[in-house]
Each structure stands twice: as C-alpha cells, then as structure tokens.
Amino acid sequence: MSTTARHDGRTADQLRTITFEADIAPHATGSVLVSFGKTRVICAATIEPGVPTWMKQQGVKGGWLTAEYSMLPYSTHERKSRDISRGKIDGRTVEIQRLIGRSLRAVIDLSKLGQNTLWLDCDVLQADGGTRTASITGAYLAARLAVQKLLDSQKLRENPLTDSVAAVSVGVVAGRELLDIAYLEDKDAEVDFNIVMTGQGKFVEVQGSGEETTFSHDQLQSLLVLAQKGLKEVSAAQTAFLTKQLLSTLKLG
Amino acid sequence: MSTTARHDGRTADQLRTITFEADIAPHATGSVLVSFGKTRVICAATIEPGVPTWMKQQGVKGGWLTAEYSMLPYSTHERKSRDISRGKIDGRTVEIQRLIGRSLRAVIDLSKLGQNTLWLDCDVLQADGGTRTASITGAYLAARLAVQKLLDSQKLRENPLTDSVAAVSVGVVAGRELLDIAYLEDKDAEVDFNIVMTGQGKFVEVQGSGEETTFSHDQLQSLLVLAQKGLKEVSAAQTAFLTKQLLSTLKLG
Amino acid sequence: MSTTARHDGRTADQLRTITFEADIAPHATGSVLVSFGKTRVICAATIEPGVPTWMKQQGVKGGWLTAEYSMLPYSTHERKSRDISRGKIDGRTVEIQRLIGRSLRAVIDLSKLGQNTLWLDCDVLQADGGTRTASITGAYLAARLAVQKLLDSQKLRENPLTDSVAAVSVGVVAGRELLDIAYLEDKDAEVDFNIVMTGQGKFVEVQGSGEETTFSHDQLQSLLVLAQKGLKEVSAAQTAFLTKQLLSTLKLG
Amino acid sequence: MSTTARHDGRTADQLRTITFEADIAPHATGSVLVSFGKTRVICAATIEPGVPTWMKQQGVKGGWLTAEYSMLPYSTHERKSRDISRGKIDGRTVEIQRLIGRSLRAVIDLSKLGQNTLWLDCDVLQADGGTRTASITGAYLAARLAVQKLLDSQKLRENPLTDSVAAVSVGVVAGRELLDIAYLEDKDAEVDFNIVMTGQGKFVEVQGSGEETTFSHDQLQSLLVLAQKGLKEVSAAQTAFLTKQLLSTLKLG
Amino acid sequence: MSTTARHDGRTADQLRTITFEADIAPHATGSVLVSFGKTRVICAATIEPGVPTWMKQQGVKGGWLTAEYSMLPYSTHERKSRDISRGKIDGRTVEIQRLIGRSLRAVIDLSKLGQNTLWLDCDVLQADGGTRTASITGAYLAARLAVQKLLDSQKLRENPLTDSVAAVSVGVVAGRELLDIAYLEDKDAEVDFNIVMTGQGKFVEVQGSGEETTFSHDQLQSLLVLAQKGLKEVSAAQTAFLTKQLLSTLKLG
Amino acid sequence: MSTTARHDGRTADQLRTITFEADIAPHATGSVLVSFGKTRVICAATIEPGVPTWMKQQGVKGGWLTAEYSMLPYSTHERKSRDISRGKIDGRTVEIQRLIGRSLRAVIDLSKLGQNTLWLDCDVLQADGGTRTASITGAYLAARLAVQKLLDSQKLRENPLTDSVAAVSVGVVAGRELLDIAYLEDKDAEVDFNIVMTGQGKFVEVQGSGEETTFSHDQLQSLLVLAQKGLKEVSAAQTAFLTKQLLSTLKLG
C-alpha cells in the first residue's frame, strides 16, 4: 500500500473526521446531524401510526421501517434541482433509499414496533462523497434516539433494535485501495464499494461495481479487509456518541 | 391592548427571539439558518448561469431571481410527506414560494445580475408558525452574503440589491392583535396578515385574510401599525448580522 | 386625482360596465355569466354529496366549499395551453382558486350545508384584466342561486350564506390610483391590489403587491378607500341582480 | 319505421333544433356556440405561429390542424372532475379529440396554412348526447370564420378549406333506428354510430359500435341512409349560418 | 378489381399467412402468439379477483373485461419509447385498447364471470400493419383458452363467451381496395377500415376513416364486402386452432 | 455442502437449463430469447442515432449504452400492473435497469460506437427467479448480434465490445448455499447475491444483501466461489451460442 498522502492528507486506510450532533430537528422523534469530513447529512427518525397497504393485504403483523433520501439543492457545487421540479426521483436516489431501508431493517425486529411505521429521512446538507454511507450510519443513531424516547414515554415496551449498523465506502483510485472515499477521489474511482455491517461484525450489504473497469478476486479481498477495518472505527464512534447521549439508560440494540 | 402574557410569555407586540447563523450550507453561494423562536429555516442562495426560457423568448435582458420553499418531512409534529411522494407541490407551498420570489425581486436590480439566475431555497427544519416570514427575512440575508462573495470574486461588478427586505406576521387571536404569531396562536387566528417591507420602510406586499371571520377597517389599521413596529426590529437585526458578517466591506443594498 | 380619461374613457374611480346573466350552464345547480367590461367568466355552483377525506379524518362536521379556476384556451389574445397539456396547474391559477375558495367560505356557515361539497367553478371565457375579482363576484351569485334551488327543493332547510361577497382590483398605474384595472393597465401597474369585502362592508381579504416597485403607507390608504368605493357599487349590482332573479323568495345571505 | 314519438316528441328521423351563435369568445380568431337541442358546445378556432416538432423533424411542409375537446365540470348532471384534477385525459376524450382533428383535416389543404397551427377547441357547456358530432359541426364553422378573418386581414392569401364538414349520430334504441340521439336514448342504445360527411356528400369517418349487442348488415345499411338524410339538413344549416355571417364575402371552402 | 400482385405477392383479396401458437406465456391463464404475416402479437388473458370501483359504486353485478395494448420498443423499425418513458399513453394506444376491450365485451356474458376481471394484454413483438386487428383476433383465443382452464379447474361453471370474435383491416391504396393491409400499404392508404365481426357473422365494430381523402358510398360498400370475405377465413382459422387445442372438450362460446 | 436435491431436482451447485433463441424480435438490430429454466426474457438491442443531452453538455465524445427492464403483466403468477398504469417505475425496476446498463458498459468501448445510443431492452415473459441475471446474460448476446449486423453492414468499423459479460445469482436458503436461485427458493432466501463477471473472469459487479438476516465473512467467501463456478458455465454457453450464430465471422469482443 502506497504511503503517499491523499488530497486531504489522509493515509489510504484513514477515515475522515466523523462527528454526530443530536437533536438537529427537534420535532422528529430522534435526529442527528452526521458529518464524514465535509459530507453532512440530517438524519431524522419519525414514528407514524399505521403500516403500508401491502402489509395489511398480505396479513403481515408488526410494523414497518422505510427510508427517504434527498439532496438539498444547495448541497452540491452546482445547484441540483429538487425531485419535484424534475417530476420524478432519479434512479440513484431510488437505489440509495432502498439501500438505507434494507440496512436498517436488518437490525430491527419489526414485530416489536407495533402497528407503526418508522420513517428514516436523510437529507444531505453538504455532499462531499459517501453520502449514502453517512446516511446509514446516521440513520441508525436517529432510530436509536427515537426508540429511546418511545421507551421512555412507554410507547414502546421493548427495544426493537437487535444490533447497531454502520456503513463505509472503499474503492480503487489510480490503482490504490482507499478507505472512505471523498468526492474528488470518487469521481475518478475505478472500483467503488459500499459495505454495510452490524456492530457485531456481520455483513448486511456488499455492493461493489467497477465503474470504468473490472476488478480481480484479489482486489475484492483487499477492499473487504479495508472496509472491515474502517467499520470497526465507525461503530466505535457510534457507541461513544450513544453512550454520552443515553447515559445510564443506554440499552444498545 | 390587553397586558395578559401570551402562551410563551411574550407581550402582544413582542417578537420571538430572532437569530441568524451564517454558512449553514457551505456549498451554496450564501446561506443562513434563520430562527424566529422555534421556527428554523435553512435559507440558501445559489447563482447559476442562464435565465428562464420565457425571458429569452420575450427578449428580456438581465438576470432572474426565483425561490423554492419546502418543509422537511420532520419539521412538523406529524410527519409531512415530501412533495415528490405526493406527486405535486401543494397550493400553500406554491403561494409561499411565489411570495418569497416577488418579495426579493422588489429589492434587486435584475439588470445588474448578468445572464444569471439567483436561486433562493428555503427549507424549513422546524415549523412553529411564521415560516414564510422567516423565509423572506433569511432569504434576503443569504442573497446579501452571496452577492458579497460574487463581488469579492469579481463575478459581479456592482451590488444589484437596492434595499433590504424583511417580513413579519400579525393577526387577531381571541380578539387580541398580536405580533409574530406562533403555531399555537396561528391555528386559532381569526385574522392573519403577512407584511413584507423594505429596510427603508416601504411596503412590498400586504396579504391579509379573515380565516374564520371578516375584519374591520379599524382592525386593518391597527395590524398595519403593529407590523411596522415589528419590522423595524427585524430589519435592525438583519443590519446587525450583516454588519458583523461583512465588516468593513459592508455595502447594504 | 388626475382627470385625464383612461384608455377606455373611464375616470380613475369608475368601474367597467358590470353585467350578470343567469343560467348560462343549466346542468349546474346555479350559474352566472359575469362580465366586467370585456372580461367574461362562467361561474357555476354544483352541489355534490360527500366531503374531503381530511374532514372525515379530523372529525370535522358539516360540509365543504371549494373553488376551481381555469382560463379557456381562447380567452387570451395568444392561445393559452390547457392545464392538462402542460401537465400541471400553474402557480397563478393555484393562488386564484385558493383565494376564491377562502373568500366564499368567509360568508358561508358550513355546518348548514350537510355532508355536501359546494363546488364553485370559474372558467374565463374572455380575459381583459380582473378575472379573479370577477370570479369571486360571480361565484357568490352562482352560489346564491344554487342555494335557492336547494331551498326550493327542500334539499337545504336554511340558507347557509351569512352575507354576500364581492371583489375588485385597484392599483397604481403611471403614478395614478385606478379602480377596476383592465388588462392594458394591469400589465404596466406598479402596485396591484385585490380587495374582497362582504355586502355589510367587512374585509375578507386584502392582497397587495408592488409589482415593479414598492409602495408607501399613504398609497395603501388611498387604494383602500378607492376599493371600498368600488365595492359598494359592485355589491349593489349583485343585490339588484338577485332581487330580480329571486323576486319575492329573496333571502339574501 | 315506427311512428311513435320519441321522449322529446321527435320522429325517428328528426334532428333536434340546431342553432349557431357567432363570436361567443371574441379573443379567438373564430368562435361559435353550437346547440343540438340541449347539447351546447363552445367551438373556437385560434391560429398560432409554428408547427409540431415532428413535422419539422420529418420535413413536412405547410401547417397543422389539431383539436382539443373538454367537458366543463358543470356540463353533466353529476359534476365531472377536470382532467387536471384526475391528472390525465380519459380515453373517451382522447378518442373524441382525435376524431375532431381527423375530420377537420379531411377538408383543409394544410399547404395553404403557412407555418401555422390551427387549434380547434371544443368545450362542452351542456351535455345531452351527441357532443362529439356537435363539436365537429361547430368546429368547422369556427374554422371557417377564423379563415375569413385571416383572409380579410391578408394573413392568408387563399382559403385552405376545400369543403365543409358536419357530423351526426344515429343508432338503434329499443330496436328502432333513430337520428341524432339524445342522452336519454344514448345510455340505452344497442348500436351507436357517428358519421362524418362533407358538404359535397363524401364520407370522412364512419364509426359504429354495438354497445350491448352486435348488429346486422341490414341494420348497418339503414343507419347509413338515416345519417345521410340528417347530414344534408345539418349541412344546409351550416350554409345558412355562414351565408348570413359572411354575406357577400362568402367563399365556402 | 386489378389483378396486379401486391408488394408481397398477394392478390387484393388475400389475407397474409395467419398462425397461432398457444401458451407463449405460461403464467397467464391463457396465451397465444398470433401472427398475421410479419405482424406478431403476444396475447395473454389473466383472471384477477375483483372488479373496478365504478362497478361497485353503480351496483353493477358480475365481472369485468378490460384490455391493454402496448408496442414493445423493438417492434418497430425505429425504436419506440416505452409509455412510461414518455410519461403517458399516446392517443393511438388508448383508442386501440378501448377497441379491443369493447370487441371482446361484445361476446362475453359478464354476469357469468363472477366478481372477477378478465385482463387481455396484447403486446406487439413485431409491427407490420394490422396490429389492432391481430390483437383482437388473438385476444379472443387467449380468452377462450383461459376460460377452458377455469372451466376445467371448476373456477367457472359455465362458459361466459357467447360467440367468437375476429377483426381484419381493409382499405383503399392507390385506388385499389385491399384486404389485410401491411405496413408498406398502410402508410399510403387513402381509406382505412377496421372491421370486427363475430363468428356468426354479426358486426361488432365498424371504424373507417379517409386518411388523406374522403370516400364514397360505393367504396364503403365494396370495403364491407371485402372485410366480410376475409373475416370468414380468419374465423375459420380460429376455429381450427381451438379445435386442435381444446380437442373433445371444445365448447366454442 | 448438503447433497439433498433441490425442489426441481438440482444439486446445490447446479445451474438450471440455459437456452438462447436468436432473432425473437426481427425488427431489433439484435435479439435473443434467453431461458434460465422457466425464467424467460426477451432481450433486444437497437441502435439509435444520437446520445443523451448530458453527454453533449459535458462534451463527452463517443456513444452511449442504456438499458430498460420490464416485466410483462402476465409474467408473474399474479398479474403485475404495467408501469404506466401505476404512473411510475418501481424502485426494484430502476435498480435492475441501472445494473444491466452498468454491466454492459463495463465491456464496451463507447468511443467506438460513434454518436449512437445502443438500447438494451429486457422484457420478462415468464418470471421464475433470476430475471436480472438472465437479462444481463441475454443482453450481452443481443448486443453482440447487433454489433455483428452493424459490422456486416459497415455501419461500425470495429467491434466496440471488449469482453463478454454474464451474471448469475447465488444465495443462502435454509442454511444451504445454492447456485442460480429459482423463485420458490428466492422468496425464502436469507442471503441473496447477484454476481456479474466477464468471460475473462474479472468481476464487474458484486451485490449481496442479507434479506432477513446478516451474513458472515465465511459465507461471503463460499458464495463468491459458487458464483465463479456457475459463471464459467454460463460464459461457455454464451460462447457456444455465438459460435453457432456467427460462424466464421465470429470476432468475440
């Protein structure tokens, strides 16, 4: 692994500075402003009575969890039109909100949610690469804070979260395998992976694509190792944040 | 005027605490997080080359200014569906973004913008009444900061802003005329006015409606006086903020 | 006030010729073709069983009143595309139909409508300025005729209308304050107000905007006086029309 | 043929009273209010510079003619939602506006229109059966009046209309073959035909359908005879109207 | 009638080779791949519990039958965008699917379908003229096969089909009256008719249009004779196919 | 690895029967009907002049390749509504068509396509699991046949395809790792992977998700091995098919 510093001074296997700020949107049941370097995402969890029609039709019991992802128009260097102005959600957004939803559903026992839907909204305030992995990482925290509020107010009896979940990107840029790819790196990446894992070290999702080229079995293996290294650190940051927020009441999912 | 305190302890002619925080969205040309009490709105100004097709077709010279307004889903006590999920912008949103656009165009000389469009995005992070007046007040500041950046980088030669602009709501609640109405008051308001004025004390827009009843000529006059009193204070707060932000380079429009 | 004649020979404080023609659309419960000079609008009131879903969800009793406004494609000098051809209602139309709805709801006791919706459709046959104020003025008459038919057929027990309502525009054109602005004047207006008042002289709605400039407190006061003068005449014309239509059965709301 | 009177007193082969009123929408280039009994349709012709994109792409010379058809919400006994409220044009409307367009294009030499589009708008004010045949009949008259105005103002050099065109419905109701079917008859019709012919007696369009049953070769022949009889009368009414309108300048297409 | 061979060697009154292939889409209740020469359409019938909302609202008993028609993007020489890419179904498609639906409803007793909807999907795999008439012809066969499967599995007690139905096009090309028009002929056709008849020789639908010109009473009569000749042959081909498919269980509707 | 047979008699590491049928849609430039057991997909490649607007705006040279995926309504056991009927493409479809597009772009040198777009349409005729992997596998063959036709007709000078590409699914069902998952297995799968590789054994895309649970590093490794085994066989089947189709002219990308 080359030891040349990256454009922002990081080593190849170094995360950007990760911070979490609770209660950015106090009307939500739980909310967090998550930053991975200059990438900043508002993650909010809100609970709403009722479940989707298909669950009723299919007789599925319990609750539901769904996610929405959006980039605020001023989050990118060139203004990005709102979805409603273009009249539809673009394909990339659809993929990302489905990924966030699946990732969070992997660590929740929906039967403990009651007949409720937990919405996870991720709105990107500033985009500098890795918005989907920051969203998953922050969405879990927003969900955990929301669950705590519902436990405290006795709207939930048990914590339905069964583990924590976090995500990170890895990729190959100019032949080097890099952790937590920033925008300047991403636009030239040859291979781009998003890896989602639980706090207990199990995989939830592995999505990798050769953007301009293909990749070998060896590269795949190296990237998986790099991601696992990074995800341990992200997971530790989540735990530290929640410990401080929830203090003695902490019952990590 | 009754001296009974309002639900939040204010007197009838008292504004909520107003704060402005610059650079909430650094990728925008200018941005401000504006708070009127618990109402919080992200206001961002971005400049984009080009003007709308109708301007070209009609041969209108100069630039354009337009506004978009949106409530983030978690800004209200009950989650509000995104516009794109409902497939259309609701009527209230259309009215508000047209109002913001007209208000800002009243204080800009579009011929000095060049062939550019100035976008003013107002995204409500927390809604507690008066989101449209907070949006106008903050949008002006975002525009002013954006103009300064464009002047400093010599993308603009002259400040196109000709005055400042701010807005406030007034209304009649349970028979009392109140300044800067919060959500709890607004939902029971009998009369609801939004007044937009320039820093030099000229009217830009007067919109008043008897929500559940009608109103008399005398009530109209009292409400105008109350709004003018409040707008002087809002305008002073804008000036103080800009003075601090722009320091010696301040050339208020 | 200048005594120079306007482009159509009127003095500054003179209305255009106002006419009403009943039963233009006999399948409606009540209908009127209203003309303010060359501006002609078909106003139709139809009653339909049922109320909007939100009323049921919120447990609101009584009926509902809503308005739709549309310009027929051949109403303007250049053909205007239908809403459905453009795929959406434009912002101006949304504003106008919300204004018509609010104005009519200000003079109706919805609890006396039963579980019904009163639709007020305003379709502009010819546009020459002031289509929204003509629409409100005509919509009231259509509603009043519809109510009479429902009273006569004993589908309603009591008249739910509590007052009459009418609207007029005033504005500043080339520095002069003018009543009932026609299209040629409107496109150059510096200030444009739409005022809605009841027959008993109470305000329902005041909407004023400086289109290309701002306006002073004194101008605002003069315009309000001018509008009130005009609205007395419009209201008198409504009463004369209804007296003739309803004859001895007249029970003005 | 049975001699029993129909619900409105007509014999089986009798048209309803047909009337035409010119200039119902003066901003259109030509307009007519057409009535077939209680069915009333506003037909307006407007000329607009330019032709559809596909004509340019395919290099087709000359102009274009297109039609739009709409039922005003209050034209039916139960209020009909606007197309824009339902978000799409229903299938019946699409069929009708395509039929009107084809019928009119059969009697126009598009190469004489210049690079212009002739729009024919048909808005149903009151629906009592036969709205599509009334629309075609009225649309021709609106087009003819529009052409005259364009000839008079020298915007056209030659009349592009090559013949007149009119339409009528025939059908089988309770076993009887009837001309010009009204709504009460139409809803029980077993067979329903719309026939479009030119003033010179050529067929333009024959559309027949067994609504609840099938029909025989003999029935088809009788219905064609009945339609031809009716269309001679409709065509004569068109000529009489145009003669009066155009007086000495009449140059029937 | 001229004896010159057509572009594909056929005489004026000769059909293209017609073939039917059963079970092209085994998950459908019944399906057929129908070919009229190079025109190939997948026709599938699927039964679904439930009926449209309007049937319930109007208290109509029994089942429903509806059709959808679509051209696969690669069915034409130049790729045709999918409906969803253009955001709407074009007018021609709407007309065709309404025609298919009406044609099939003419030969079914909906009261024998139970509270079910029979969907008839027609997807054009290759378009060479006459796709709507091939669709109707194939849709009947798909419906008949579906009915047999439902009878065999005792989900239906009686065959609801009351007759067979088939369709063919006829037209005037370069002055000649031709049967079963292929694409090369169709694009130059002066008159274009689609005729739908039952196996017992009754008319279901007659749709004829002068595409670039008008047509005479004599031409209409000749075209009807030509269509009837062709439809006898198409109907015989349907019977032969079904006889082979259904063997001894054949109970032709 | 358990030796119990699967529901269809296969061993855990056995593919379903794979077949390819050329020219299913002759109007396309190239087309293939691909079957993986009962899963059948029509894959068609069509070339169209022009490239997307964004390529022109960004000054990107060469051509473009894009994919569309759709399930025919009768491809599933319960009829699936068309996209246009629901008014939008569902999230799963968006993901799949983006995946097909990326996979094919990984093996094409777009600079050799000229200013053309290569469309790859995949329409599912019968769905029994693995429709996206069958689509990618068939889309490559359709593209290869299309390229050959364009080379033969000298519309292309060089083969732009740089390698072949194929895809297969692997997963964990009831604890067993299985190759090429059919529908009955898929709906109970705990882990579901889609792997895309080139004929030369390089990875193009790795997408894996724990549908109801998470998965370990060891499981991930086993699944990758299983997929690679299957993909060698799929790639060999592609080569055999193309060899037969292209005979001596074969120049595999």
Image (cartoon, coloured by chain):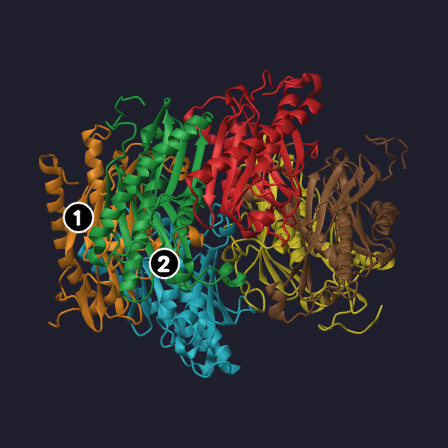
Chain colours: A yellow, B cyan, C orange, D green, E red, F brown
- Looking at the rendered structure, the kind of residue marked 1 is Phe
The reply to whether residue D76 is in sight is no
Give the image location of residue E109, x and y in percent.
Answer: 52, 21
Q: Residue at x 11, y 50 (%)?
A: C236
Residue position for label 1? C20
Question: In the image as oriented, which residue stretches furthest toward the left?
Answer: C248
Is F213 on the left-hand or right-hand side of C34?
Answer: right
Co-location on one chain, circles 1 and 2: no
Q: How far is the residue under mark 1 from the one under mark 2? A: 39 Å
Tell me, for residue A115, which label it has, or none.
none
- Looking at the rendered structure, the kind of residue marked 2 is Pro
Residue position for label 2? D160
Where disc 1 sits, the SS reads strand
Where disc 2 sits, the SS reads loop
State yes or no: discs 1 and 2 in contact (Cβ < 8 Å): no
Is A107 on the left-hand or right-hand side of E199?
Answer: right
Give the image location of residue D33, x and y in percent.
Answer: 26, 47
Q: Chain of mark 2?
A: D
Quarter where residue C7 is shown:
bottom left
The reply to whether residue A188 is in sight is yes
Q: Residue at x 60, y 59 (%)?
A: A41
Is F50 on the left-hand or right-hand side of C166?
Answer: right
Q: Nearer the viewer, residue A30 or A228?
A: A228
Quarter where residue D155 is shown:
bottom left
Q: Residues within 10 Å of mark 2 (few under 14, many from 20)?
A: some
The quarter in which the C terminus of chain F is drawn is bottom right
Give the image location of residue C228, x and y in percent.
Answer: 15, 58
Q: Where is B214 relative to C109, above or below?
A: below
Q: Nearer the viewer, residue B106 or B192?
A: B106
Q: Where is A156 relative to A216, above or below?
A: above
Give the image location of residue F207, x and y in percent.
Answer: 75, 50
Q: Nearer the viewer, residue C251 or F67?
A: F67
